[in-house]
């Protein structure tokens, strides 16, 4: 697996967590409206599925780092939203077409 493939996989997981959380929150909002609950209960129904999604996004987001210099790549990767693929690290110039190191980012 190349560094680019690894980063793409991590970004895809973050986006999946985001959209699943949003989808479940929308379903929870409809269920809450159908049950005619109080406003506080509605907020609880909507917030409950978003908390695990945000936790997953933050946890995996910490892993969006250059395996060579450990620079944070979250902003560059998430702003592009898959339209632009990073070919090298903007901080150290590492080529992302290289194979992923054995122990990336101290995992």
Image (cartoon, helix red, strand yellow):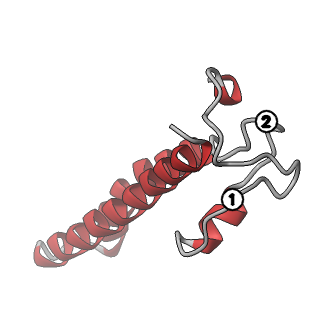
Residue 63 at x, y percent in the picture? 62, 40
Q: CA distance from mark 1 to mark 2?
A: 14 Å
Disc with the residue nearer the chain's start (1 vs 2) = 2
37 or 11: nearer the viewer: 11
Residue 15 at x, y percent in the picture? 44, 61
Residue 68 — which label? 2
Name the residue furthest left.
34
Residue 33: name its quadrant.
bottom left
Residue 94 at x, y percent in the picture? 79, 46
Residue 10 — which label? none
Residue 28: name its quadrant.
bottom left
Residue at the image point whose x is 11% and y is 77% from the top: 34
**Looking at the image, is 91 positioned above or below residue 60?**
below
Q: Secondary structure at mark 2?
A: loop
Residue at the image point whose x is 57% and y is 49% from the top: 7
Quadrant of the snapshot with the C terminus = top right
In the image, 60: left or right of 93? left
Decide if residue 58 is in sight here: yes
Residue at the image point whose x is 15% and y is 76% from the top: 36
Say which residue label 1 marks.
87
65 or 21: nearer the viewer: 65
């Amino acid at each position: 697996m190349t560094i680019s493939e690894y980063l793409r996989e991590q970004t895809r997981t973050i986006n999946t967590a985001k959209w699943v959380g949003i989808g479940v929150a929308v379903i929870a909002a409809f269920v809450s409206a159908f049950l005619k609950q109080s406003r506080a209960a509605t907020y609880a129904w909507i917030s409950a599925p978003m908390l695990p999604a945000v936790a997953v996004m933050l946890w995996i987001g910490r892993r969006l780092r250059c395996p060579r210099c450990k620079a944070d790549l979250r902003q560059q990767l998430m702003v592009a939203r898959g339209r632009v693929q990073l070919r090298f690290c903007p901080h150290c110039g590492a080529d992302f077409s290289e194979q992923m190191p054995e122990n990336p980012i101290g995992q």
